[in-house]
C-alpha cells in the first residue's frame, strides 16, 4: 500500500545536506549545511521566514523535500536564482533524473509531471515537492532575493485564471458563505496556474478500504504484535492512540502536556490539526485504558528521560512534549519511523509468509475510518437520518473540515460492497453449473460460506482496540 516510504527516506537522506541547531543568539531557527559545512543561505532564509508565519509542520515537511533539490543544484553547479527559463530547465532535469518522473509539455503552457515505477516518491509526495518549490520562490521573491517572477507559476495560465475570476459571482466570498459562484476548489481545478502540474489521474480513494477483510485483519494482528512487543512504553502508547483515534501520526507524536491538560476531560486531548498552523485545536478521544497507559508512561519511562526528572503532569509546562527520546528531546516522526521499522519486521515474521502485508502508520488511520463507517451503517440499519447524523458526528471527531473526505470513504466502501456482491453472485452461478453437471456441491457451499465470513463486520467497533 505504501511501498515507497523507505525509498523516500533514502531520497532525502542522500541529498548531502544536513540540519543542525543554530548557535545561541542566531536569528535562524535552523541551519542547513552543504557537504563542506557551509550554510545554504536560500534554504536557511526561506525556512526562517516560513517558520515565522507558520508554526505548524508545513515548513519542516517542505524543507525535507527541498534538501534533495538543493543537493542536486550544488552537485551540478547550478544556481537557484537563475532566470525562470534556466530554473525550469534545471527542475525538469532534476525531476527526470533524481525523482524518476515523466515530464512532458502541458496543453497550454508549462509541464505535466507524473511519477513512474522508478520514482522514490509517491504521487502525493511529488505534490508536496512541487508545493515546497513554489513556496520557496514565493517567499524569496517577496523578500527581494529572487529578481524575477516565480518560475513555478505560469504567467499565461495566471492571466487566464484572472480573466475567469472576473466572471465569477461574489468572487471574494469564502466558500462557507455559500454565495460564491463556484468553490475555490472548482476554480483551481478548472484553471490551474502552476507551471509544473501533476498529470490528473483517478480521484483519490483510500486504498485500505478496498482491501479484503482478511487483509485488514492481518494488519490488526501485526499492530497488536507491535504494541505487545514494543521496546519503549512511548511507542506502545503512540500505537494505541493511532489505532483508536484515527489521528495522523504527526498529531500524536507532537502532543504536548498543555494539549493533554487543556482538554479538561478524561480520555481527551487537544492536538495540532492539519492546517491549524501549530495551534492545538483538534480534540481526539480515547478510552480510560489508554488514559491509564499515558499516566503510567509519564510516571515511569518519561520521567527517566525528562531533563528535570518530572514524574507528574502538574510538574510539567504546557509547552513540554508528551513524548521524549532517550536524550530527553522531543520525539519526532522521523524517530518514530526508525522504531516502527524495528517493530514492523518482527511483526511480519510473526505471520505466515503468504499472509504478510506492507502498510504504513497512515494506513492505520484509513483502517480506523473504514471500520467506523461500516459500524455506523450497521447500527443505522437503513435509517438514512440516523446514518447521516452518525457520519457527521464522526467527521467532526476526525477533524475534517470538508464533508467531501467523508463522502469519499463512504463511496469507496459502497463500491467495495458492490464488487464483493458481484463476486459472490458469480460464485453462486458457477456452483449452479457444477450441480447441473453432476458435481458434488458440498465443497461449493463451504467455499461460499468462507467468502461470506470474510465479508462480516465486527459489530463492536472497539473490540480490538482495548485488549
Image: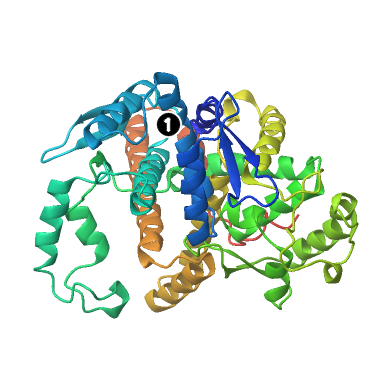
Q: Quadrant of residue 262?
A: bottom right
Q: Tell me where residue 120 appears, x and y as whole percent.
A: 45, 28
Q: Position of residue 93 (x, y in %)?
A: 31, 24
Kind of element beneath mark 1: helix
Front-most of residues 276 and 50: 50
Q: Is residue 84 above or below residue 316?
A: above
58 or 143, which is in the foreground? 143
Q: Residue at x 51, y 37 (%)?
A: 446
Query: What residue is drawn where x is 51% and y is 27%?
Result: 15
Q: Residues within 10 Å of mark 1 (few under 14, many from 20)?
A: many
Which residue is more in the foreground, 244 or 84?
A: 84
Note whether residue 288 is visible: yes
How are the residues colored?
rainbow
Q: Is residue 437 visible?
A: no
Q: Is residue 287 above or below residue 444?
A: below
Residue 195 drawn at (x, y percent)? 23, 41
Q: Is residue 458 left or right of residue 402?
A: right
Could you tell me which quadrant the C terminus lies in? bottom right
Q: Which residue is mark 1?
A: 69
Q: Quadrant of residue 222?
A: top right
Left or right of 120, for residue 97 = left
439 vs 367, nearest the viewer: 367
In the figure, 376 relative to 213: above or below? below
Is residue 292 left or right of 434 when viewed as pictured? Answer: right
**Residue 34, position in %: x, y?**
55, 28
Amino acid at each position: 500500500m505504501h511501498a515507497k516510504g523507505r525509498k523516500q527516506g533514502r531520497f532525502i537522506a542522500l541529498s548531502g545536506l544536513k540540519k543542525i541547531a543554530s548557535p545561541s543568539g542566531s536569528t535562524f531557527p535552523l541551519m542547513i549545511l552543504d557537504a563542506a559545512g557551509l550554510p545554504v543561505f536560500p534554504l536557511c532564509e526561506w525556512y526562517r521566514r516560513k517558520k515565522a508565519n507558520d508554526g505548524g509542520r508545513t515548513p519542516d515537511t517542505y524543507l525535507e523535500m527541498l534538501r534533495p533539490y538543493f543537493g542536486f543544484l550544488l552537485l551540478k553547479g547550478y544556481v537557484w536564482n537563475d532566470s525562470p527559463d534556466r530554473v525550469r530547465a534545471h527542475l525538469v532535469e532534476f525531476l527526470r533524473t533524481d525523482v524518476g518522473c515523466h515530464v512532458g509539455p502541458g496543453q497550454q503552457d508549462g509541464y505535466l509531471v507524473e511519477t513512474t515505477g522508478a520514482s522514490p516518491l509517491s504521487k502525493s509526495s511529488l505534490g508536496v515537492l512541487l508545493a515546497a518549490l513554489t513556496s520557496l520562490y514565493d517567499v524569496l521573491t517577496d523578500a527581494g532575493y529572487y529578481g524575477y517572477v516565480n518560475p513555478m507559476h505560469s504567467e499565461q495560465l495566471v492571466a487566464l485564471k484572472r480573466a475567469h475570476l472576473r466572471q465569477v459571482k461574489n468572487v471574494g466570498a469564502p466558500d462557507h458563505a455559500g454565495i460564491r459562484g463556484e468553490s475555490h476548489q472548482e476554480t483551481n481545478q478548472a484553471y490551474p496556474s502552476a507551471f509544473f502540474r501533476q498529470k490528473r489521474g483517478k480521484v483519490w480513494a483510500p486504498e485500505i478500504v478496498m482491501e479484503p477483510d482478511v487483509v485488514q485483519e492481518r494488519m490488526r494482528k501485526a499492530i497488536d504484535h507491535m504494541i505487545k512487543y514494543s521496546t519503549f512504553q512511548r511507542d506502545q502508547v503512540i500505537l494505541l492512540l493511532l489505532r483508536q483515534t484515527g489521528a495522523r501520526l504527526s498529531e500524536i507524536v507532537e502532543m504536548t502536556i498543555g494539549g493533554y491538560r487543556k482538554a479538561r476531560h478524561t480520555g481527551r486531548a487537544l492536538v495540532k490539526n492539519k492546517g491549524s498552523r501549530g495551534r492545538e485545536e483538534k480534540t481526539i478521544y480515547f478510552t480510560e485504558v489508554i488514559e491509564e497507559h499515558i499516566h503510567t508512561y509519564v510516571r515511569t519511562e518519561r520521567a527517566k528521560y525528562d531533563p528535570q526528572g518530572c514524574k507528574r503532569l502538574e510538574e510539567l509546562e504546557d509547552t513540554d512534549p508528551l513524548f521524549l527520546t532517550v536524550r530527553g528531546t522531543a520525539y519526532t516522526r522521523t524517530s518514530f519511523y526508525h522504531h516502527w521499522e524495528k517493530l514492523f519486521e518482527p511483526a511480519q515474521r510473526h505471520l505466515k509468509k503468504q499472509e504478510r502485508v506492507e502498510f504504513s502508520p497512515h494506513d492505520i488511520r484509513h483502517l480506523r475510518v473504514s471500520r467506523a463507517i461500516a459500524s455506523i451503517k450497521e447500527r443505522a440499519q437503513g435509517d438514512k437520518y440516523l446514518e447521516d447524523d452518525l457520519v457527521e458526528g464522526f467527521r467532526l471527531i476526525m477533524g475534517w473540515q470538508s464533508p467531501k473526505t467523508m463522502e469519499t470513504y463512504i463511496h469507496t466502501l459502497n463500491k467495495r460492497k458492490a464488487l464483493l456482491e458481484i463476486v459472490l453472485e458469480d460464485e453462486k452461478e458457477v456452483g449452479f453449473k457444477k450441480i447441473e453437471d453432476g458435481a458434488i456441491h458440498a465443497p461449493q457451499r463451504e467455499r461460499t460460506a468462507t467468502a461470506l465470513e470474510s465479508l462480516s463486520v465486527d459489530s463492536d467497533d472497539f473490540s480490538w482496540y482495548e485488549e
